[in-house]
Image: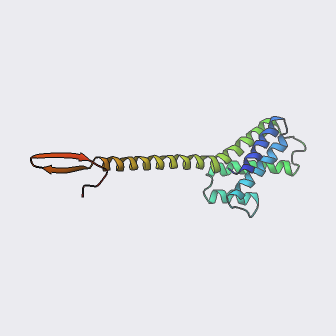
Amino acid sequence: MPEIIGEMAAEAHTCRGIGANRAAVSLARAVVEATAKAKGITTGSLQKKIDALFDERFIREHVRDAAHEVRFGGNEVAHGDLVSEPMDAATASEILGLMDEILEEVFQSPARVARRKQQRLEREQRQKEGSDQSEEEDQPILNASAEIIEIQYSDEPPF
């Protein structure tokens, strides 16, 4: 994941850890927006950016819904909708958990799959190269002299 997004997410968790719940949720909302922008979705409201993440198959439906919940929480904080009821720790923690799911879906899981695929392809290539070498080494060379047939193995092809 882009370093700045990771730093913002870590800072959101730090804020939650010291009881700065509104700051944590506000940062979580910013992380969702930065995630969309990192995937090239740069125009429109955050609601439209989240829907575009889904439409472009960066996230599944339930993760889209999670992103909207993070957006709603961030909007409550940003627009002062919590004046009568402050953001409690449980709600802030849940919103950060949803933020983490979004990051997992967009960045972490695809990176793990790509890494696993690359490792498999490299292993297959090494096996193929090893098989090619073994086949070359096992090519018999026939030398007939009088009545004795001698089989030798060489790196040279038999022709």
Among all residues in the image, which is located at the extreme bottom? 43
Drawn side of residue 145 relative to residue 8, left or right: left
User: Which quarter of the rendering shows the C terminus?
Assistant: bottom left
Res 40 quadrant in image: bottom right
Residue 153 percent location from the top left of the image: 26, 46
Drawn side of residue 119 relative to residue 34, left or right: left
Among all residues in the image, which is located at the extreme right? 83
Among all residues in the image, which is located at the extreme front? 146
Q: Judge whether 52 appears above or below 144 on screen.
A: below
The one of 143 and 126 positioned closer to us in this rendering: 143
Residue 113 percent location from the top left of the image: 55, 48
Residue 139 percent location from the top left of the image: 26, 49
Name the residue: 81% across, 43% down: 24
Name the residue: 73% across, 62% down: 42
Tally of marks: 0
Name the residue: 85% across, 51% down: 78
Drawn side of residue 32 relative to residue 56, left or right: right
Q: How is the image coloured?
A: rainbow
The one of 130 and 30 positioned closer to us in this rendering: 130
